[in-house]
Image: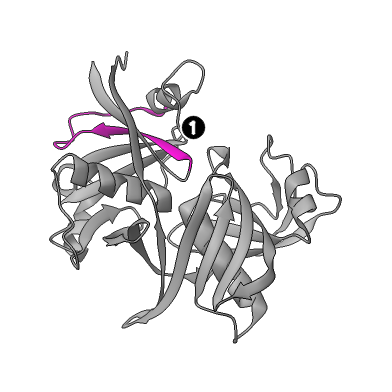
Amino acid sequence: MVAFTKGHGTGNDFVIIADPDGALDLSAEQVAALCDRHFGIGGDGILRVVRSSAIADGAAALAEEPDAEWFMDYRNADGSIAEMCGNGIRVFAHYLVRSGLASIEPGSTLPIGTRAGVRDVTRSETGYQVDLGLWKLSGDDPLVTADGLAVTRPGLGIDVGNPHVVVALASDAELASLELYRTPQLEPELPAGANIEFVVPGEPLVRDGIGHVKMRVSERGVGETLSCGTGVAATALAVRYWAGEKAPNNWRVEVPGGTLGVRMFPAEDGEHVALSGPAALVFHGEVDLA
């Protein structure tokens, strides 16, 4: 039997398994079974809590930041490996703090290793904030076809440590009419796939110096989720890009599971983007991996 914890960030839910010494070798089939909402625990993915020194992918994290003791081994619900998860890393940090494995004192930072590099987590008014690091326009701007959309739409490719394609819609009604039971199609297809966000600007777009948008998302390897942290960041970046140079650097993005904050700010190596929002642990249990 293996102990687990169920947690979520704005409805983006995860099965958390503590494996500090890297003793578990979770197969894709085991991950998919654990995330199955009918026959397993249920979740959008798995967060394996492992020391950076106990996993091969952690070597790069320790080389980047020797204090990055913990590594977030994130798997999508279908068992595939993902580079990063914005909601997941807040839940991961919350688990470390609640379990006594790490602490985040006021004004301090907790570095966490991921396959997209080390990410720094701090406390915020709404829970936790994570610096997602540098972002970029990926140059992948495919056409997007989705059930419920009358016509194919252009997408904007954005990389925040993992790949995203953001699609602008005209109204709340158009956003609500989307049927994301099937994965939207990209033309051309991207070799590594992408998370696909559909976004509607607020009316007005900017209120009190803060941008407001609504979003739904189809996550790579998962399907539609109530929230996607890196997708929220990509959405805010895309809308700011479309809005032009006078657009704000602070945003509120409404997703089906709640609201998250996004902030863009200058750093020594270029512009970074940060994500802030809540994290919750729901229940604990044991599961037979066999």
Which residue is depicted at the point 26% across and 29% down? 25
Residue 105 picture quarter = bottom left
Horizontally, is 28 left or right of 58 in the view? right
Q: Which residue is mark 1?
A: 78
Total numbered badges shown on the rendered structure: 1
Residue at screen point 56% across, 77% down: 208
| Residue drawn at 40 percent across, 78 percent down | 265
Residue at position x 75%, y 54% in the image = 172
Query: In the picture provided, is 112 more to the left or to the right than 81?
Result: left
Q: Nearer the viewer, residue 245 or 172?
A: 172
* Magenta region: 11-28
Q: Nearer the viewer, residue 82 or 104?
A: 104
Would you place residue 249 above or below residue 57 in this image?
below
Relative to 288, say whether 29 is above or below: below
Q: Is residue 139 visible?
A: no
Amino acid type indicated by mark 1? Asp
Q: Position of residue 173 (x, y in %)?
A: 79, 51
Q: Is residue 4 above or below residue 61?
A: above
Q: Where does residue 32 sit, x and y in percent of width and height?
A: 45, 26
Pick the quarter of the image with the C terminus. Answer: top left
Is residue 14 within the magenta segment? yes
